[in-house]
Image: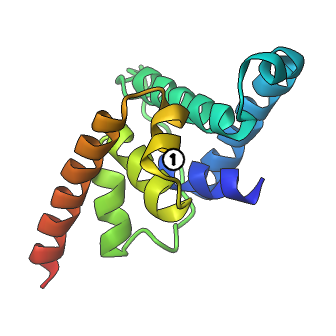
Amino acid sequence: MPGLLRYGHVLTGNPHDAADLVQTVLEKVASRWSALLRKASDPLAYARRAMANAHVSRWRRHRRENLVADLPEVPAAEGADRLEHEPLWRALRALPPRQRAVVVLRYYENLSEEEIARTLGISRGTVKSQSSKAMAALRARAGEWA
């Protein structure tokens, strides 16, 4: 569970959305648990892949603009994320979802390329290329900081 929460935090950008993502995915996984044990060799990899897919689906649904007739009287106050102003964290959040997922699984969860490919349902070559692109983007951002 702590590993899934960490993975969710890096995917979503905040701990509250991460907890919601983990809970949603674990509910779905639990409802299919017996079939999952028969078909999949690694339930944790299945859960990580489901989290990545659910996050991308949620991101696609919510990135649309919601028009309202009237503006709210009081603007919604968001809690400050303690990592919000960290340059590396901002650079990581700026990566596309698949690149971010590859970086998180590789460097936060210490998974091999093969495990990442299995988790995300992509080829090993795609893992390598996404990792390379993500690291190039992070290096470019690091050059800006220096």
| Image height of 83 relative to 70, above or below | below
- Name the image quarter holding residue 77: bottom right
On screen, residue 59 versus residue 25, left or right, reads left
Is 104 above or below relative to 90?
above
Pick the front one: 70 or 1: 1
Q: Nearer the viewer, residue 67 or 2?
A: 2
Locate residue 109: give its quadrant: bottom right
Above or below, 86 against 14 in this view is below
The quadrant of the picture occupied by the C terminus is bottom left
Percent coordinates x, y for residue 85 in the rendering? 37, 73
Q: Secondary structure at mark 1?
A: helix
Residue 83 position in % (x across, y down) = 47, 72
Camera-side residue: 88 or 109? Answer: 109
Q: Amino acid at mark 1?
A: Thr
Is residue 146 toward the left or the right of residue 86 in the image?
A: left
Residue that appears at 57% across and 62% down: 79
Residue at position x 17%, y 68% in the image: 139
| Viewer can see residue 75 | no
Q: Identify the residue at horizontal 54%, vertical 35% (top origin).
A: 119
Judged from this view, the residue extending furthest toward the right is 34
How is the protein colored in the picture? rainbow
Q: Position of residue 40 (x, y in %)?
A: 71, 24
Q: Residue at x 30, y 73 (%)?
A: 87
Identify the residue position indicated by label 1 in the image. Answer: 12
